[in-house]
């Protein structure tokens, strides 16, 4: 796996439930807009509790791994 992706996952809080701000902070994003957009598109499984989204830690890890760029053999980025 990509070392950058593993570093992002290591920065995720060690809690059972995370909020979009936790993921955004681990990724170095200034806002949660991209995370919330991906929740609304169905790219991230989340539950809305009290008007706020919560995401399981396993789902957050899966989501971060899904964002990793994996070049195909014989291609240049």
Image (cartoon, grey):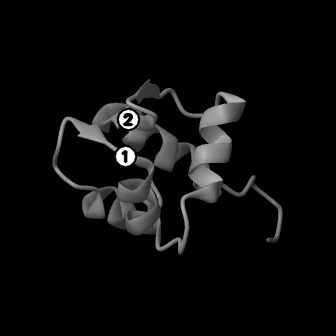
Residue at screen point 46% across, 62% down? 24
Give yes or no for contact between labels 1 and 2 (Cβ–Cβ under 8 Å).
Answer: yes
Residue holding disc 2: 54
Residue 3 visible in the shown view? no
Whole-percent x, y for residue 30 in the image:
53, 75
**Residue 19: assigned label:** 1
Tell me the crowding category of disc 1: few under 14, some 14 to 19, or many 20 or more residues within 10 angstroms, Cα based.
many
Tell me the residue at 38%/35% (across/down).
54
Q: Position of residue 17 (x, y in %)?
A: 26, 36
Tell which circle, 1 or 2, labels the residue nearer the N-terminal end.
Answer: 1
Q: Residue at x 75, y 52 (%)?
A: 72
User: Which sits in the foreground, 14 or 53?
Assistant: 53
The total of numbered circles placed on residues is 2
Which numbered tag is attached to residue 43?
none
33 relative position to 74: left or right: left
Observer-nearest of 40 and 4: 40
* Residue 37, placed above or below residue 70: above
């Amino acid at each position: 796996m990509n070392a950058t992706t593993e570093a992002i996952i290591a920065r995720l809080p060690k809690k059972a439930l995370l909020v979009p701000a936790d993921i955004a902070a681990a990724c170095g994003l200034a806002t949660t807009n991209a995370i919330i957009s991906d929740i609304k598109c169905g790219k991230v499984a989340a539950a809305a509790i009290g008007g706020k989204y919560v995401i399981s830690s396993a789902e957050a890890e899966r989501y971060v791994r899904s964002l990793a760029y994996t070049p195909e053999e014989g291609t240049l980025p």
